[in-house]
Every structure is written in structure tokens, then in C-alpha cells.
Amino acid sequence: MKIILTGGMGFIGSCLLWKLNQEGLEDIVVVDELGDKLKEKNLTGKKFKDCLSKEQFIKSLDKFRDVDLILHIGACSSTILTDEQYYIKNNFEYTKTLAEFCLKNNIKFLYASSAATYGDGSLGFSDEDKDTPRFKPLNYYGWSKQNFDLWVLKNQLQYKFVGFKFFNVFGPNEYHKGEMRSLICKRFDDVVREKKIKLFKSYKNEYPDGGQKRDFIYVKDAIKMVFYFIEHPDKAGIYNVGTGEAGSWNDLAKALFSALNIPLNIEYIEMPGLLRDKYQYFTQADISKLRNAGYSYSITRLEDAIIDYSNYLKERSYL
């Protein structure tokens, strides 16, 4: 199988590359932004045919008409940039170009959407097609993903493509992501050194401090879900990639301190004003559609995932 993997040097992309190698797939062209030495470490030990920049790839796109699959994981995933046109060009238009290329050349197209499409969560987290147009994301990143999902539905391409609405993915290979790293990655060294973790206070009465909830999914489970659709090319649609069970930031902290055998010590701090109006207090993937598509594997418990991830964080090791 010949595969194009965009974002292959990134967090989820490089973990997918690891999974593809584990399954004996090596005829892979990795596409990403080149020159980031920390990010390039994600490719250590991986097997692939070539590595191209996004610009090189687009310019030579016609040379790849014989590939079997494009896994489009690459995108700007920052939720705080304010350049709307950049998101439109980089996330929406670029994805549309690849999608149309796949349609023209009968290539399977799998792409990354996001749980950011659900906005504040007040309308739920259903990935059923009839519900998708109702959602109103809170930032330009979310809108860039939502608009492509809507383009897919408008053109009835949910019967050909596979989209993945990733929830809060965490795990090895995210070390390069700066402020966009998961909390466990950002605060691991602080917990080891200071024996304390800082969490945001809550500004809603129904949630205690640290009680805001997320659907935290370990990257090993996320890539297993993606690979299921590579194994089953007859399946299509837009699916949530999550556990189906929300956990609080307090739960996350407790699991981390337990994994490190350190007494729990949480300091609650003020949330920056910039975030307060756009903060999601609750996310929980509805994964019934995924299950109905035949995905029957068990999903790693948060506590077990953090124990496993801690072993990587201690050594800054990679998948």
C-alpha cells in the first residue's frame, strides 16, 4: 500500500507513522513543515520512503496519482491565533485541494477534524451528520475544521471519506507542541520537582475548581481508531475519536500523582481573562457511531494511560 501522511512529523501523525510501521507498512511519504529539530525527533527509528515540505508536496501533487491512501493529519492546531485567513488557507483550502485530488484519482482520503467543532458543548457531542450543521465553534481553528466537515456533507462525500473528530489526545511525541501540549506533558517536570500542580479555578457554580471535564484519550487508542478505517476501506463517515467518558482535571492530576507515587497537591489559579469566555467546561465524545461501525476494541482507562505515558515522560522517549 502506498500512503501519503501529512503532518507525519507532528504528534498524532508521527504516532500514526509508528502504527503503520508496526503493521508492516513502509511505502509512506511524510509531508510536514521541515526545519524544526525537536519535531524531527518524532521520526527517529521510523521507516518511510521520503519526507517533503508542504510546498514541495503540493507542487508535485500530480506525481502521486498512484497512491492508495492520503492520511491528512497536518494542520495548524493552535486555538489562539487570530489570523482567520491563515486558517482558511492552511486548514480549509489545503484540505479541500487534497480531497478533490483524491476524488479525481480514486484515492482513499482520511482526514483530521476536531472536537473543537462542538464549540461550548451546549449542543452536545453527536457526530451524526444531521447534527453537524448546528455546531458553532469558539475559535478560528474550530471553524476551519467545521467548514470542511460541512463541505464534505454538502457534497455527499461522507460516503467516500473518513473524518476524525479528535478530542483531548495526549501521549508520547507531543514534546514539540509548546503551549498546545497536554497538561500532563506541560506539568510533568513541575510535579516531579515541586510536588505540586496548578489547575484553573472554575467560574461556573456547577463545576468545582479543577472539576471542568474533558474527554481525555491516549494517543495509542486514537491511532488504533484511525487504523481501523485503514483496515476497513469499505467504511466511511465522520467519527468522534474519544473515550466516551469525561474526566476532570482533578482526576487527571490524581492519576499523575498516583503514577509518580507523590502525595496529591493541587493549587488552583485564576484563568486568564482571554480564555474565560471561550473555555469549554465539558467535553465527552459520543462514540456510538464508531461502535456501530464495528470498532469493538477496549479503550485504555485514564489512570492506566497516565501510568504508561509517565514512563515515556521520565526519559522523554518516543513512540
Image: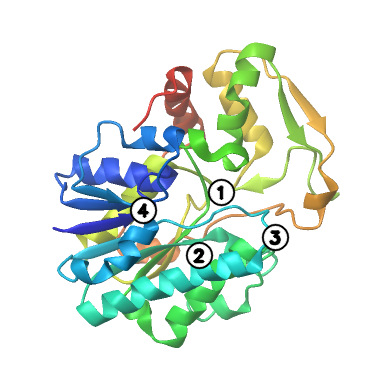
Q: Earlier in the sequence, mark 2 or mark 1?
A: 2
Distance (Cα) linking label 2 and label 1: 27 Å
Q: Please give the label number shown on residue 215.
A: 1
Distance (Cα) linking label 1 and label 3: 26 Å
Residue assigned mark 4: 53
Q: Amino acid at mark 4?
A: Ser
Distance (Cα) linking label 2 and label 3: 14 Å
Quadrant of the image containing the C terminus: top left
> Residue 126 in the image: x percent, y percent?
54, 68
Label 1 Cα crowd, 10 Å radius (few <14 / some 14-19 / many 20+): many
Distance (Cα) linking label 1 and label 4: 32 Å
Q: Nearer the viewer, residue 133 or 303?
A: 133
Mark toward the viewer: 1 or 3: 3
- Tell me if I can see residue 183 in this picture: yes
Residue assigned mark 2: 90
Mark toward the viewer: 1 or 4: 4
Are the residues flagged by discs 1 and 4 in contact, CB closer than 8 Å? no
Q: Earlier in the sequence, mark 1 or mark 3?
A: 3
Instruction: Determine whether the residue tagged by mark 1 lies in a helix, strand or loop.
Output: loop
Distance (Cα) linking label 3 and label 4: 24 Å
Residue assigned mark 3: 82
Q: Residue furthest bottom?
A: 155
Q: Amino acid at mark 3?
A: Thr
Are the residues flagged by discs 1 and 3 in contact, CB closer than 8 Å? no
Q: Residue at image x 28%, y 45%?
A: 17
166 relative to 271 in the view: left or right: left
